[in-house]
Amino acid sequence: MISGIEILETVKMIKEHHLDIRTVTMGISLTEAISDSAEATAKKVYDKITFSAGKLVSVADKIADMYGIPIVNKRVSVTPISIVGAASRGFEKIALAMDRAASEIGIDFIGGYSALVQKGISDSERAFLDSVPEVLHSTQKVCSSVNVASTRAGINMEAVACAGKIMKRAAYLTRERDGIGAAKFVAFANAVEDNPFMAGAFHGVGEADRVINVGVSGPGVVKTALESVGDGDLSVVGEVIKRTAFKITRVGQLVARKAAELLDASFGIVDLSLAPTPAVGDSVARILEEIGLERVGAHGTTAALMLLNDAVKKGGIMASQHVGGLSGAFIPVSEDEGMISAAETGALRLEKLEAMTAVCSVGLDMIAVPGDTSEEIISAIIADEAAIGVVNNKTTAVRLIPVYGKGVGERAEFGGLLGSAPIMAVNPLSPAKLISRGGRIAAPVHANKN
């Protein structure tokens, strides 16, 4: 049970400190839609999504009114389409069916135009990967991801090269909108099957038929709690973050269970990630500065982020038996007012962001780079990030947006939760020979656990 004091605390968090349910995401299995006809598969995909998630938006709105908790996004994730469309090879038709279904039921995004190619790429998966840039251009709500590495398999460098080409091509096709197509695509190492956040959400093959996963966010709540610490040591700081994360996760647990009940779906997980928005007062960067940094990017930033991420996870795990997804602190540059400010002043650089990804929940996220950045450099950035994930047995990801016609110091505008970003400098030295070698970087020795 939630006490009266907790209820009052939660109301204050919502009204004053930007606490919200960032997303209610329904995961839907599409395995029963598989057929050898592209048209038949597309129709079954559309029917399954609209039938299963037809009430998702209305139920989420009802819960928001019931509890007074803002629910910012309503989303759907589906079985990786590289699997669903393998027999028919009608990937583009399936993507259009997904987009129509998303518009029909009124959700914000649909994820799962995805492939898991961490160890090898089949012929049908090559066809799928070739389709991704055009799909991101021709659809409005479809999001895509590719898992190029895992601790168990190592890094598939052919897949890494493909991912670099996809980012570059998707950005080019949407160059009139500052490359927003690339903002709907992410390359992963160690992708998880129950992630409710876009662009990387997909419904894992080990999941139930219909599952509700909820993502909670409250950077403003954590920062406000830390303002009361004063000169307390870092043990005190960690304890305050942990207790605050516990309260935030309780809210997510409440919403997730109610949504699953009303939608006749299984309750999956609560993802307790601190996901920022461009709004002032809703920034992960400002939490790190409250811990004791003059500006994010200063020496000590990685240590402060480690403290934050670990304390968030510990508090959340105490609040729910089913914590999952990515869970921790996100550092998307374009979506965080403090990160944007630090990047604009030169305090935060790409190399420092890469170091931070070793201890945060995702990776290099929503970073705008010059439009003339080569495919090979983009692929090499993905490879570096995958190496961090593989060696540390954690999820890492890359979502870069090459912005055509713009250079370092200019700004890309994406709108909404995606925000805007200063275009950051990239090391111009060529990794072309490394990327062209192909093959696989073997799994680390500690992957051999059996």
Image: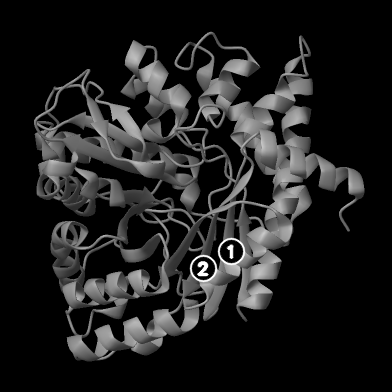
Q: Is 390 placed left or right of 176 in the picture?
A: right
The quarter in which the C terminus is drawn is bottom right
- Circle 2 residues within 10 Å: few <14, some 14–19, many ≥20: some
Residue 354, image quadrant: top left
The answer to whether the residues at label 2 and label 1 have Cβ atoms under 8 Å apart is yes
Q: Which residue is mark 1?
A: 61
Q: What residue type is disc 2 on? A: Val
Q: Position of residue 448 (x, y in %)?
A: 48, 54
> How far apart in space, not on screen, are marks 2 and 1 (Cα)?
6 Å
Residue 124, image quadrant: bottom left
Q: In the image shown, does 426 or 179 lie closer to the viewer? A: 179
Q: Position of residue 183 (x, y in %)?
A: 28, 46
The residue lying at 64 percent from left, 17 percent from top is 291
The residue lying at 26 percent from left, 23 percent from top is 424
For the residue labelled by badge 2, is the local secondary structure a helix, a strand or a loop? helix
Q: Position of residue 160 (x, y in %)?
A: 23, 48
Q: Is 36 placed left or right of 374 in the picture?
A: right
Vertical placement of 317 versus 218: above or below? below
